[in-house]
Amino acid sequence: MADLLVAATHELPEQLLRDVRILCDRAFGDDFSDDDWDHCLGGLHAVVLGEGVVLAHGAVVGRRFRVEQRPLDVGYVEAVAVDPGHRGQGLGSQVMTALETIVSTSHELGALGTSDLGRPLYLSHGWVEWRGRLLGDTSHGPVHLPDEQGAVLVRGGTVALAAVDLEADLTADHRAGDIF
């Protein structure tokens, strides 16, 4: 039987955080960097444990995005990972349901960057593709990120998705590593 733990980064024991990092490294391989790890810290985590072993994980961290010039508080989903030996058992869906509850109650909008592997899970949960241009804030102003097109998905939070223009420019706050 798997148990779900939802807690802030500072509430998680150090060993559990180390185990989550090991899971992410195993699930993503060389595609998971130290910056990626840093991106998932400081928010709320959903961790699925089976007999004390981390089987799945995801986090929501607060970010500031702009749709055109309208600032939005975004719950950004990070580091959704399922142990390769436990995929196909609904653990990713369990994590996403917990993260979506956080987004819907605490953030105006939810967003995430997806891989081809994760895309079907997110779409099955009602996430939709951002169709407008994607930009990232830099010290020199917003920069267009065409390589990210099609990989950013969103869902409504405290603001209904119908109230957001999915064709508009979406600008993400600056951070080290991948912006989305």
Image (cartoon, rainbow, N blue to C red):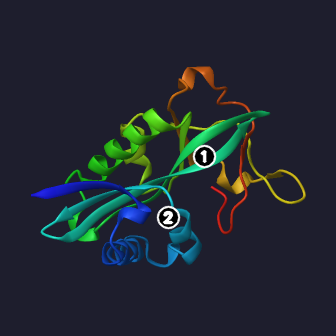
Can residue 127 be spotted in the picture? no
Left or right: where 4 falls relative to 167: left
Q: Of label 2 and label 1, which has the lower sequence position?
A: 2
| Label 2 vs label 1, nearer the camera | 2
- Residue 13, by quadrant, is bottom left
| 3D distance between C-alphas at marks 2 and 1 | 25 Å
Furthest toward the top, the residue is 162
The quarter of the rendered structure image containing the N terminus is bottom left
Residue 42, placed above or below residue 15: above
Q: Nearer the viewer, residue 104 or 166?
A: 104
Measuring from the top left, give residue 63's x and y in whole percent.
Answer: 62, 49
Residue carrying label 2: 41
Q: Which residue is mark 1?
A: 150
Tell me the amino acid under the disc marked 2.
Leu
**Residue 7 image offset from top left, x and y in percent:** 35, 56
> In front: 171, or 47?
47
Q: Residue at x 29, y 47 (%)?
A: 93
Q: Residue at x 27, y 48 (%)?
A: 94
Disc 2 is placed on an element classified as loop
- Could you classify mark 2 by the number of other residues whose Cα lies within 10 Å: few (under 14), some (14-19), or many (20 or more)? some
Q: Residues within 10 Å of mark 1 (few under 14, many from 20)?
A: some
Residue 170 vs 21, above or below: the answer is: above
Whether residue 20 is visible here, answered yes or no, is yes
**Residue 168 left/right relative to 20:** right
Examine the rendered structure and indicate whether residue 137 appears above or below residue 41.
Answer: above
Q: Secondary structure at mark 1?
A: loop
Left or right: 29 with respect to 151? left
Check contact, mark 2 vs mark 1: CB within 8 A. no
